[in-house]
Image (cartoon, rainbow, N blue to C red):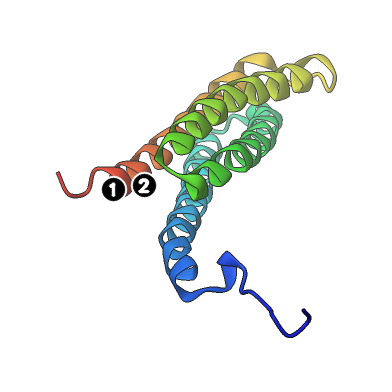
Amino acid sequence: MASQMTASPEATPAASAARSPARRLSTALVVTVVGSVIVVAAVTAAAIGFSGGHGWWSGWCAALAASVLAASVAMAALVPGLRTGAEAAVYGYMVAAFLRVVVTLAGCAAAVFVWHTPPTPTLMLAVPLFFAQIVAELIVLRRAFWSGQ
C-alpha cells in the first residue's frame, strides 16, 4: 500500500505546462496594473508639484492609498479566476471591477470624512488612478484572450 504512490495532478509535467500560461498571465496582469498605478501617480505628483498646489498633496496621498488598496483587492479577486479558466476569468473580472469601485469610493470617503482630506483633490486624483487600472487590465486581458483574431 505504501509503495503505491500516485502522482498528484499538480506534480505531472502536463499540469505544470498547462498552469504556466495562467501564471504568466497573472504575473503580467499584476505587473501591468502596478506599473500603471506608479506611472499615473508620478504624473499626477509632477502636475501637483509644477502647479504649486500644495493643498492637493493630502488628496493625492489619500487617492493613492485608496487606489493601491483597490488594486490589491481587485487582483485578489481576478487572479484566481484567471488560473481556473475563461468563464471563471470573466466572473473574476466582474467581481474585481465591482470591488475596485467599492474600495476606491470607500477609501476616498474615509479619507474625506475621517481624516478630513479635501474632497475635491481626493476624488479628482482618484479618477485617473482608477481608470489606469482598468485600462491596464483590459490591455493585458485582450492580448491574452483575443490575440489570434
Instruction: Answer few, some or many: residues within 10 Å of disc 1's Cα (few below 14, many 20 plus, some between 14 and 19).
Output: few
* Residue at the farthest left position: 149
Q: Where is residue 33 in the image (x, y as percent from the top left)?
A: 49, 46
The quadrant of the picture occupied by the N terminus is bottom right
The residue that appears at 63% across and 25% down in the rendered structure is 104
Q: Residue 140 carries which label?
A: 2
Q: In this view, does 110 lie to the left or right of 69?
A: right
The residue that appears at 53% across and 49% down in the rendered structure is 34
- Pick the front one: 49 or 87: 87
- Tell me if residue 146 comes above or below residue 130 in the rendering: below
Mark 1, residue position: 143
The residue that appears at 51% across and 46% down in the rendered structure is 84
SS class, disc 2: helix
- Tell me if residue 117 comes above or below residue 16 in the rendering: above
SS class, disc 1: helix
- Pick the front one: 16 or 144: 16
Q: In which quarter of the image is residue 62?
A: top right
Label 2–label 1 contact, CB within 8 A: yes
| Amino acid beneath label 1 | Arg
* Residue at the farthest right position: 114
